[in-house]
Amino acid sequence: MVRDIAVTLLFFFLIYYTLRKPFIGLGAWAWITFAFPAGWAWGFTNNFRMNFSIALLTYVGYVFMKNKPKFKLDSISMLLLIFGLIALISTIVTNSLLVDYSWGKFENFTKLLLFYFAVVLIMNKKIHIDTLIWSVVLSISSYAGLESFKFLASGGGHRVAGFSGHMLGDRNDLSVAINMAIPLMIYLISQTKHKLLRTGLIFLVILNVIAIVGTYSRGGFIGLIILTGYFLIKSKRKVLWIMLTVIGLSVASTFVPSGWSDRMNTVSTATSQDSSFIGRLWAWKISVKIANNNFFGNSFLASQDPLAWSLYRTEIDDFGPVYTPPIPADKAAKAAHNLYFQVLGDMGYIGLLTYLLILLLLYFRLKKLTKKAKELECEWCAHLSSMMSISLIGYLITGANVSMAYFDLIYIIIALSYVIEYKILIKKL
């Protein structure tokens, strides 16, 4: 009850400031999305539609904003609208047995697009951007830090995972989110002048490294290695990143049981010995079969559709470049656990092409912004663009292990890149 009251009071506090300052509403929107306050309070607050309320009030606040920033419909924004249209058509024409769930997922995807356009419409200052990034970090990274304490206190016995029923409930999904949030923390460290707060952020990075180890996620650990390598090559703060990673891994290694090492060692033998990975190969092949036979795919949760598995189950053992054992008749349908095959099954080849084009344009935009910001002597823009490109690379690589094609944080990064290009740097020309 006390938690419910605390969450409710905070919620009404956020409502007040959302109407006065819509950019605060965006931060609250992100906090509710990632922190999942309903998971902390188990009473009457579970009946509140917090996200919907904050989203609605954020747009109401935007309507009454004075001196609204100008909006330009750029190529990525247009592609996102096309991507949303493909998702709608796919959900309308699907013959999936999970169509009711698909419409629920489409509703979530629509909220994601509304969040994107709210960011590009409202934000036009550094404080707006930093507020949103702080919200993301305090939601994802603080939770990961808390979980790492549990991991250490249990002597490595506690497996780090998110709240049940939350988008980051799965430990693999959580590990990807942590990997994406770490570069954003590095950015905040560079922008924070308060010594105690900087020290706290550095300590939080170490805890997040430990949390990734505690997820027992092979993909998350690979992502951490990739992040470390990228920082060694590109970052001006090589010593800081090496120090944080070494400390985090050293602390974590003293607590991990033998089962953790055994699991990490299965990466090289996954195709032949890991039944979990074989199940993913089945789901990937089913996704390809779905796309081959459905121009717009099979809508959200495509590879988990029992009808699709029953239709293509007998066709996939010799299908594709990798042989897999035949799928048993009683085997339940599986999630794709790969964001590329996820989109392929959900929205067909046209959806996957659109999705990849969005991510490709984002990558080149961030590279361009990093260079352009340096030329215009906007160091914070350059650093943030560089850190977001690292988050993007981590997402693209670790995404091969998770079904996170519609993860909010990647769309926030897209939106922030828009704000930097069309709202911040344009003022310096």
Image (cartoon, grey):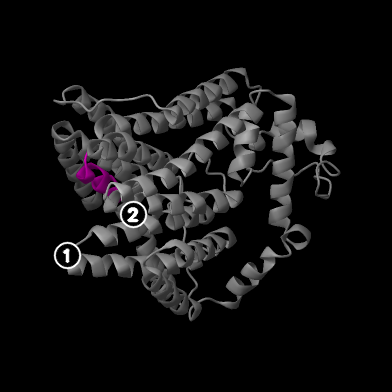
Q: Between marks 2 and 1, how big is the CA–CA gap?
A: 19 Å
Q: Earlier in the sequence, mark 2 or mark 1?
A: 1
Residue 78, relative to residue 54: is it above or below?
A: above
Using the image, tell me which numbered label, if any, was put on residue 194.
Answer: 1
Q: Residue at x 70, y 42 (%)?
A: 284
Residue 178, image x, y percentages: 43, 57
In the picture as drawn, the residue positioned furthest to the right comes out as: 318
Q: Residues within 10 Å of mark 2 (few under 14, many from 20)?
A: many
Residue name at image x 16 percent, y 23 percent? 64
Which type of secondary structure does the marked residue at label 2 adopt?
helix
**Residue 305 appears in which quarter of the rendering?**
top right
Task: Look at the numbered disc 1 and give the secondary structure of its residue.
Answer: loop
Q: Is residue 10 left or right of residue 84?
A: left
Tell me: 350 left or right of 372. Answer: right
Q: Which residues are magenta?
A: 124-135
Q: Of residues 244 and 124, which is closer to you in this image? A: 124
At 37% across and 40% down in the image, what residue appears?
417
Q: Say whether residue 129 is magenta.
A: yes
Q: Which residue is mark 2?
A: 383
Q: Is residue 87 magenta?
A: no
Q: Is residue 407 above or below residue 86?
A: below
Q: Position of residue 94 (x, y in %)?
A: 63, 22
